[in-house]
Amino acid sequence: MRVLNSAARTPLARRSALLTLAVSTALLASACGSGGSGGGGTAGSSGGSQTTLTYWASDQGGSIAQDVKVLTPELDAFTKQTGIKVKLEVIGWNDLLNRILAAASSGQGPDLVNIGNTWSASLQATGAFLPVSDDVMGQIGGTGRFLPGALAATGAPGKPPVGVPIYSMSYALYYNKAMFQAAGISTPPATWADFVADGKKLTKNGQWGVSVEGASTSENAHHAFTFSAQQGGSFFDSAGKPTFDTPQNVAALKQYVDFVAADKIANPSNAEYSNGTEAVKDFATGKAAMLLWQSADATLATYGMQSGQYGVVPVPFASAGASGPTHVDSIVAGINLSVFANTKNKDAALKFVKFMVSKETQTALNKAYSSLPSVSDAYTDPAFQTESVKVIQSVLANSAAPMPAVATESQFETVIGSALKNLFADAASGKPVTNQSVAAQLDQAQQQLLAGG
Amino acid sequence: MPAAIDTARSRASAPRPEPPSASSPRSWARIRRAGLPYLLLLPAVLFELLVHVVPMLVGIFMSFKHLTEFFIRNWSAAPGAGFDNYRFALDFNSAVGRNLLHSFEITCGFTVLTVGVSWLLGTGAALLMQDPFRGRGLLRTYFLVPYALPAYTAAITWEFMFQRDSGLVNQLLVHDLHLFKTAPFWLLGGNSFWALVVTAVWRTWPFAFLVVTAGLQNIPGDLYEAAAIDGAGTWRRIRSITLPQLRPVNQVLVLVLFLWNFNDFNTPFTLFGNVPPPQANLISVQIYDTSFQNWNFGSGSAMSVLLLLFLLLVTAVYLLVTNRRRKAVD
């Protein structure tokens, strides 16, 4: 304003020049202002002694609002205990990895972040996360307190882990009890041959045997890994070199796509599903009778399905007597909590990690998310004594395998997931899915993966 | 780019008045007067440098590095790559080079179609809206709605409409009009290309409409009156007066539409997610995939630089040809 007032006494040309200057300064200031707040995410101690941590949580509850509802009381408890505030942002699975990468490359990120544990080795390679030292591990109860499988998925073997497991999960087969009864199926399938046969019986009158998330790269990649392991195949050799185009992997991918292509037990529309909720919704609303999913109880409840309406059993095997390395029916799924290396609040962040793996927090959060605690002392709670929890617990203990702990793991998920997405698209639009077309996709995926390195 | 628009615009405007006679002794005042525009431009130039030129230079720098996940936290530690990234992107025998070439072809087809249809729709609507009638203002505003909507909102709405089972498009085509026996996919396979074009045209044409409408206001009315006296019909008047008079406007409009659509990322990314169907794989998404999905920022940058060079070339040739043509016409 002062500028304009003084301008009133100056000649016209000067005045307009000053006015323009004033306006551009104002614009400049506002641009900087919005840039500052828009690019936010870095937490700083906001005046005084109050520390604020920024925490990016993954979407565990079926919707971001649900996650905020679950996490807020816990974060409040943490603030009460320690006086440290936590700024929460829940990020959907579609964006999480990109956001982490952007944060890692710019150095502007949160203090703490949830990661899918399968990305551990990849993100470890970037150096974006603070390694968990033996000292820190000791402070949170030592390695002996954590489930061994979950702990294995915190980085490449032989390197200090870059996170601590907070939620543990595995895949299981969820089936609709009423639909099984109506189709005259007494026991849920234990082999894929039974699964397909049952699926065909269940597919009728606009209802489908199974729903899959055919355009979700991560879901696709997890199934590709498990199906391949059941065939005795693998996507990487012992040296970490990709070995995509093998007969076992071709058979694995084809088996999964055939749910739509040859067996026709999944709705072709599933080829479009990508955001990680649609297949669950189809199952919860009775459009599909079976679902292969990780710890789905909480999400199913969000969509209005009662726990009595569905049963939970392990994912089928290739044959009834599967044993040894083919005795795999799930990835070791789960969520790790990692501290960004750039954090300015290291001590506060470690306090938060300690809080998140405490028995109380583990019990409360895993109960709400229907996942399993990653620490053994939290299992005394009756919430973890239910049928479905026991199934998942046993899968995790006996038959879950960790995804390849190679630096290119996250690229692997993308390229294999994309290959399956393309194959599902072919199947959905009636193009034949053959061993040749699967092999071609695998070959292309491998070239893309090698191109990344 | 902005320079190109500026020259085009200054040429389009009426001849400027002669500058005041140069014999004035008050040279300080002259310097001040001449310097003022540059002073006022200075903040814009600085911001242009900051917002466009610096990131561009960083991108070019990155394209000569082996910038993978191991180095994203400390770029300077990434080993130099020489022209490896470029050689790799242009090796059409490998999967990556082949995909890049394929997406380049798709993008060319997509851009030509989108710009062509958008221009036709925009010009047609602007001509129809030229003569006053009741409700004209309302309709003009209504036409601008797609342009005013945020890109994400617009594209995600189309994504919902194109869904196979629950989308409005199939509801209309399959259930109401019975044009198809089984519901087609719009977001997968060959149809995804058309879904992309439709969405892009819907988002782009209001801009063409807006610019052509503005251009029409500058055409002197007496030209039409003279033509009417000479007995020229509507079509003749459009061809002989409107279109030639709009030429400078169209020159810029087509160029801007071309550049926008060729680089469009929001529309395909919102419609198809991170992995688009191969038939609708635009080059910007392909570059994004190389950078962020395969974590190879070096070759992603190399592809971006190649794209930049291509667009520069097209723009230069376009401006050269159209300007020369106009001079010939003048």
Image (cartoon, rainbow, N blue to C red):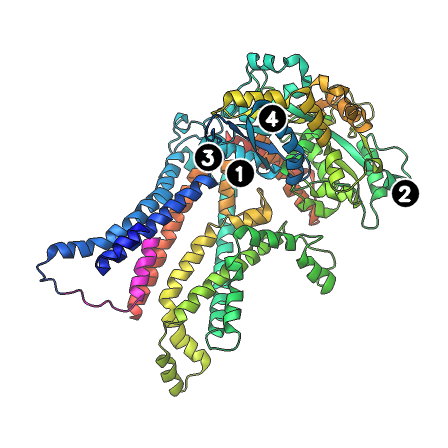
Q: Are marks 3 and 2 on the same chain?
A: no
The percent position of residue B71, horizontal first and vertical second, equals: 45, 27
Q: Name which residue type carries label 4.
A: Lys
Up the image or down, A412 lies above or below B283; here it is above
Q: Are marks 4 and 2 on the same chain?
A: yes
Residue with the mark numbered 4: A80
Q: Name which residue type carries label 2.
A: Ala
Residue with the mark numbered 3: B297
Camera-side mark, 2 or 1: 2
Q: B113 or B149: which is nearer to us?
A: B149
Q: Which chain does the numbered disc 4 sit on? A: A
> Are the residues flagged by discs 3 and 4 in contact, CB closer than 8 Å?
no
Camera-side mark, 3 or 1: 3
Residue A159 part of the magenta segment: no
Camera-side mark, 1 or 4: 4
Q: Which chain does the numbered disc 3 sit on? A: B
Magenta residues (range)? B1-20
C-alpha distance separating marks 1 and 4: 55 Å
Q: Which mark is residue A182?
A: 2
Q: Are marks 3 and 1 on the same chain?
A: yes
Up the image or down, A382 lies above or below B44; here it is above
C-alpha distance separating marks 2 and 1: 49 Å
Residue with the mark numbered 1: B95
Q: Are marks 3 and 4 on the same chain?
A: no
